[in-house]
Image (tube, helix red, strand yellow):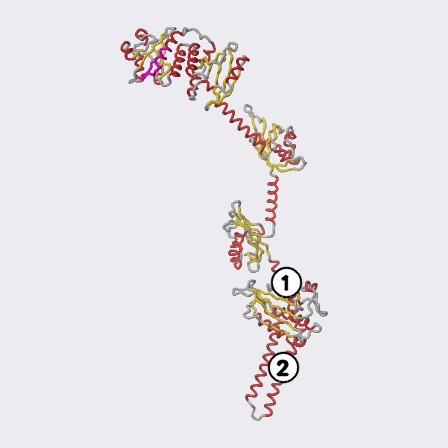
Amino acid sequence: MTNPIVSALTRAFGAAALAPDQRARVLAMSRLLEAWCPDQAYAAFVRHPAGDLLQPVAGMRRLQHGQIRRTSGGSDQGLNEHLATCTPTPLDTAASRCPDTPVLARLKAAAPDTQWQLVRAALPDGGDALFAIAEPVGADALAVAVMLAGVLQHITGAPDDPPALPEASLLWRDPCPGLLFNGRGDLVLENPAASALASQLALPGVHSLLPANHGALFRSAVQGVRSIAEVETDVADRILLWTYIPVADGRRVALRGRDATEQRRAARWSSRVDRIHRLITENTTDLISRHDRAGTFLYVSPASLQLLGRMPGELEGTTLSNLMAPAEREQQDADAKAALVERGFHTMTCRLRDAQGGYRWFEIAMRAIRDTYSGEIAEWVCISRDVTKRHRAEEETRRLAAIVAATTDLVLFSDARGSVLHFNRAAGDHLGLQHPLDSTIAVADLVAGNSREAFIQEALPTALRGGVWRGDLRLAGRGPDGSFPVSMVVMSHTGDDDALQYVSVIARDMSDREMREAQAREHQDELAHAARLSTMGELASGIAHEMNQPLASIMNYARACRNHLDRADTPDRDHLQDGLKRIDDRAQHAAQVIQRLRAFIRKDRRQITAVAVEPAVRSVIEMVAWEARRSGVRIDWTPPPRLPPVVADQVLLEQVLVNLIRNAIDASRDQDGNHDPRIWIDASHDDEADTVTIHVRDNGPGLDAHAVENLFEPFRSSKPEGVGLGLTISRSIVEQLGGTLGGEADVAGGMVFNVTLAVWTRGGEA
């Protein structure tokens, strides 16, 4: 490993020998003093032969600010007579000998409390060099200064002669770092710029500024006698470019460095940006392309394969307009070129043909690139995005909007507060609304009074909570009573953040259905009334028998009272009262029978109310009792305790029960060998479903599975004389009452029919 002192000595002597002037030689020697005694404070001065003053060259920084100018007529040349060369002399001694010497005054002013040892060198060109060594003086500092002064005195050179080596002068004055090596690779000169840069970067020497492969580069330059340009090296935070220049047929090599930090960093950044842009272009799902002024593809990104099924090379050389649909091509191309000329950019949506011959929708953003000098369009860049799915969605949205606007259903949209935002034509016609709304209208205000509470408390909260609500309400508007029925759907719509955006209401006018239902009910009532009349006709003999008993009793009791009056001179008052009472009881019984029959066959509007099940069943049993007795059928009725009332019309419920019981009588009577034909009637209450079911069971022959399946079909009857409408009408009546009527074969034989009705609640229907 080379000794640093030897290396510094070699460089200093080489630099001094090759230096272009005495100042440079003194500076080179000063570098050696710094290398040998790094902790020693000193100052170095040099005087030109034609000058009177010693000027600072190196050493203490505060001694190097500017040139020393003559101020009071003093001169430093007097030191030549009083200071022996290469001999240390204290500053106070020199000052006593030469009191007006400016350089001494400068040293005292720079360091008032410091003692100095002065060493003078008489330079060959007639000038002087002065080394001032500050106390405390290091062990070798004074000896080194004396040695350097002696060396300077023996380096030949004249002030006006050129340096021995031309390249040395160029390197020395070059503001860029410069080094000179001999053919063996020894550093013989480092210019001030190189020294300053090494010092600025806190490097141990100028060798640290060189490339890592400096040895190989040096040998290549020497052996090939060829220059090697701009070898890049990173030093600290700098980027240096070194050029190796062989001179004197390779006997020496000059190195010139250039600080290219900003340039190379900008180039590296530009390269990195270009690479990122290339990666983005090559990996983006959008189609990026460049075109000349005619629209011809100059560059196409790889996305063309995915979007159009075409390789980039297939598109290069063709024009963009050739891919457009023929019907749109001319207009789109003209609009795009005009916009690029006028504004420099253009966006259009058009169809482009893929490799299979189909068309896909693209949104194309164009930007013109103009010539810097002429301003003419040189080329343009396109970014094409496949918007086929979006275009289809927009078309579907437009179609849906057209359907919403033209539909006969009422459609309204409201905000989160329930205020109407928009409505279609049907809603405006039915509700008397017009665009624009003069004031804020709540959807709830459009609901009829008797339905408003249900909308506010049930429909809207259910939609907001579960997303949708369906039901029947009435809206305020045209109609005989200022309202009309609707089948309504209320839906809430949320955004990506699950926050409510708006509420939609779709309502269908059900006035026609309500009218048809009213007509159907009227027709059903007519059928039910006709069925009751028919039933009364079939029960005529039983009714006559039922009436004969009280009438015969009345006649007998009346005759007995008259005979008693004819025979007795003094009528027995108690006996007569008993007879008259019996007549009254029989007359009331006959009146009740007639009243029950009148109620059964009367033609009134149905009245849905709370109906007690037990009295209704007993009334029906009494109505068919004579027919049951004549057929030998026993009817057992076992009412459960505390049976709640049901939602029904009493006459219609009795009609259904009469039909079921009479069918059961016929079935039980037709059973061959049935010595005990019976009918069981009971009822049950389902607390969970809140319903009451009346069961009518017989022990007749029953029906097969096929007959049970078609039990309620019209015009089907197991009776030879039957029409097949009784069960159909009965089931229709029960369903209109909101209940169900079903029949099934009993496991014990016969049939069982179940009439299920809702329990009447205190506030109204169940």
Q: In the rendered structure, does residue 135 fall within the stretch colored magenta?
A: yes
As drawn, the residue found furthest toward the right would be: 720
Q: Position of residue 628 (x, y in %)?
A: 65, 75
206 or 756, which is in the foreground?
206
Q: Position of residue 215 (x, y in %)?
A: 51, 17
| Amino acid type at mark 2 | Leu
Q: Which residues are magenta?
A: 132-148
Q: List the residue tagged with mark 1.
A: 520
- SS type, badge 1: helix
Can you tell which of label 2 and label 1 is closer to the viewer? 2
Residue 15, label in figure = none
Precedes in sequence: disc 2 or disc 1: 1
Q: Quadrant of the C terminus?
A: bottom right
Q: Is residue 334 left or right of residue 110?
A: right
Residue 331, quarter of picture: top right
Q: Residues within 10 Å of mark 2 (few under 14, many from 20)?
A: some
